[in-house]
């Protein structure tokens, strides 16, 4: 560690100190990302936009990487310019074309784990995906911190992580006053499901139903 003195510029943010605090400014950063030869023009943005992310009248940009880069730069500028947050948020909604299908608010998840799948440290990897109706809303793939002694243990750990994610999403929907039936957690390991039904081996939430499913190879 080195003592570099008082901070004055860090990650595109200029810092000016005063007896009452610090003043953050991104004038230099804004100058670098904006075109200097363009003419400034006040163009108020409509509160209710008629554009949609998958409308027939919209044409996809031929260089989506450039668009995402520009929007990301503007999003970083909102740190010191919160007045741009609404316009930048509207631009962020068109960085991709998400399609959400309407349907029943049913929360369900699929859990899986590859036992000792890593050939270097023999650790397993947990993978799960959570859907609300027909729409995928959460997913994860994470390697276990320790080595599992059996495939049942690896699958049970995957069930525990997925159950925690389901519980979090269920509490979020409850806080939003959204009514939904009991979430369903699908697993392809009968031994892991047997452990979840035995209260001696687990402390799983009682509001999640674990169901077995068979994968087709």
Image (spheres, rainbow, N blue to C red):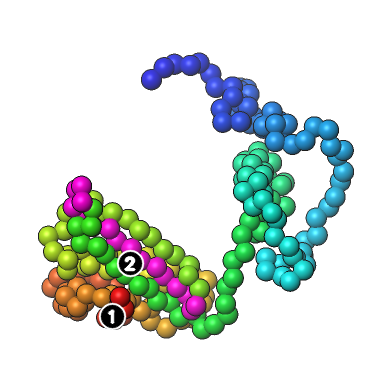
Quadrant of the snapshot with the N terminus: top left
With respect to residue 49, does 32 lie above or below? above
Which stretch is magenta?
Answer: 119-134
To which quarter of the image does residue 25 belong?
A: top right
Q: Residue at x 84, y 37 (%)?
A: 38
Seen in the image, is 168 located left or right of residue 191?
right
To which quarter of the image does residue 61 belong?
A: bottom right
Give coordinates of residue 165: x percent, y percent.
37, 65
Q: What element does badge 2 sit on? A: helix
Q: Residue at x 64, y 52 (%)?
A: 64
Seen in the image, is 100 located left or right of residue 58?
left
Q: Is residue 96 magenta?
A: no
Instruction: Answer yes or no: is residue 146 visible.
Output: no
Give coordinates of residue 166: x percent, y percent.
38, 69
Instruction: Answer yes or no: is residue 62 visible.
Output: yes
Mark number for residue 162? Answer: 2
Question: What distance separates the C-alpha of mark 2 from that of mark 1?
Answer: 18 Å
Q: Residue at x 23, y 57 (%)?
A: 117
Task: Indicate which disc, 2 or 1, sits on the residue closer to the N terminus.
Answer: 2
Give coordinates of residue 141: x percent, y percent.
35, 58
Mark number for residue 214? Answer: 1
With respect to residue 211, does 85 lie above or below? above
Give coordinates of residue 157: x percent, y percent.
23, 63
Q: Residue at x 29, y 80 (%)?
A: 213
Camera-nearest residue between 51 and 2: 51
């Amino acid at each position: 560690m080195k003592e570099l003195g008082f901070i004055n510029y860090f990650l595109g943010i200029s810092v000016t100190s005063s007896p009452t605090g610090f003043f953050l400014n991104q004038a230099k950063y804004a100058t670098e990302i904006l075109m200097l030869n363009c003419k400034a023009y006040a163009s108020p943005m409509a509160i209710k936009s008629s554009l949609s992310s998958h409308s027939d009248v919209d044409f996809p940009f031929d260089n989506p990487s450039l668009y995402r880069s520009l929007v990301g730069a503007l999003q970083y500028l909102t740190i010191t310019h919160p007045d741009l947050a609404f316009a930048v948020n509207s631009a962020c909604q068109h960085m991709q074309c998400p399609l959400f299908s309407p349907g029943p608010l049913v929360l369900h998840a699929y859990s899986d784990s590859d036992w000792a799948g890593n050939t270097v440290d023999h650790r397993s990897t947990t993978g799960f995906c959570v859907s609300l109706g027909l729409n995928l809303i959460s997913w994860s793939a994470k390697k276990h911190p320790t080595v599992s002694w059996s495939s049942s243990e690896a699958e049970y750990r995957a069930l525990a992580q997925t159950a925690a994610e389901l519980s979090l999403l269920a509490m979020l929907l409850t806080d939003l006053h959204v009514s939904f039936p009991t979430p369903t957690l699908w697993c392809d390991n009968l031994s892991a499901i047997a452990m979840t039904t035995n209260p001696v081996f687990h402390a799983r939430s009682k509001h999640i139903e674990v169901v077995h499913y068979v994968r087709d190879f």
